Amino acid sequence: MKIDRITVHVFRAPTQKPVATSFGVMRDRPAVFVRLSDGEGAHGWGEIFANWPAAGAEHRARLLMEDVADLVLGREVEAPEQLFDALTRQTHIRALQCGEWGPFRQVIAGLDTAMHDLFARRLGVSLARYLSAGAGASVSVYASGLHVSAAGEEIAAARARGIKAFKVKVGFDARRDLDDLRVLTAGLQQGEALMADANQAWSLHEAEEFARQSEGLHLAWLEEPIRADSSLGEWQRLAQASATPLAAGENIVGFQDFAAAIESGAFTVLQPDVAKWGGVSGCLAVARQTVAAGLRYCPHFLGGGIGLLASAHVLAAAGGDGMLELDANANPLRDSFVAQHPVTEGAFPIAEGPGLGIDTLPDEIAHFRTLSLDSAGG
């Protein structure tokens, strides 16, 4: 097929409750949605990471249209992963020249997801079925985005939806974090699990101390307690310091680095983000390697509805016992897409419609749009 048009939309939804992490606060919820079409009536949707920096959403959209679109328009593609491979090669010098590796990778990730959606739609099958004939009909979810000191009510609300796993954000004050975690774990019910995400808050020494002190809490995993770019030796040392499983992956980039992480023995849970690196091509490959190694694939995602749906379809295709990350904070740029796919008994259903099941963007998010760009080529 030949790509003849790219459209990108940027949205920002105000939030009454900012999302706090150890490194900063999200004061609105951005999303960048990209649409590819092939000139024969088929189209596909993808999502480009835009949570950070605060001004990043509009920048990603312009980067796509002004620096990457010329490499996509008019291109003939026989398989969706071809676009990912080609753009990764062709944008290397462009990204090197300006040092914007992340934005280029995120744009390519969104385009890759859109390309997979387009191919699946042309065949009339769901993205999950396109990726694997044996894809599951639903995936388990866990509630995330919960601040450790104010998670009680949100855990109760998630529990009412049948969700039995909850991830809280820590990394603010270690002593208070531990006290809050003790309260939360004491309130867990039979079969429930609690995870903690430090968002790279600590030094290796601080993380080792936290891991030791939290060991009796039996956390399902401790996520990014140290910088994501710490050496594998440091991650291995941390893994040896505590029985608490370690999780990472949203900030790992490239097949080689993921393979090294999987082989290191330091991680129990791998969490690539479909909108940050790899799109469907990269994340599915990493997911299959993770599952084959006996580890757990739990895709990271904290954005809009298109990326969440793509994450769910990849997880369903990959198999294993992983869980889908479901942000518990209100976000119309996500909720408007998944309203027709309610979580039931802690499971997110995989719709059987073509591709991701998205024809047009929901009308109810139109007033959050800050930018739309369109480009067509021969």
Image (spheres, rainbow, N blue to C red):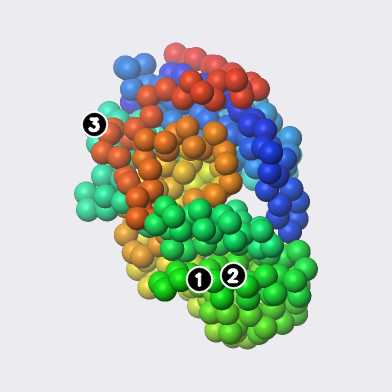
Corner quadrant of residue 57: top right
Amino acid at dot 2:
Leu
**Which residue is disc 3 drawn over?**
124
Residue drawn at (26%, 38%) of the image: 352
Tag 2–tag 3 contact (CB < 8 Å): no
Contact, mark 1 vs mark 2 (Cβ under 8 Å): yes
Q: How many C-alpha atoms fall within 10 Å of the one at disc 3: few (<14), some, or many (≥20)?
A: some
Viewer-side label of 3, 1? 1
The N terminus, quarter of image: top left
Residue at 72 percent across and 82 percent down: it is 209
For residue 8, what is the image quadrant? Answer: top right
Q: Residue at horizontal 54%, vertical 16%?
A: 375
- Locate residue 247: give its quadrant: bottom right
For badge 1, the amino acid type reads Leu
SS for callout 3: loop
Asked if 340 appears above or below 210 in the picture, the reply is above
Q: How far apart are marks 2 and 3 (CA)?
A: 45 Å
Residue marked by disc 1:
188
- Residue 105: assigned label: none
User: Could you tell me which secondary element the residue under label 2 belongs to?
Assistant: helix
Residue 181, percent across and down?
Answer: 63, 72
Residue under pointer 2: 184
**Distance in Å between CA atoms under marks 1 and 2:** 7 Å
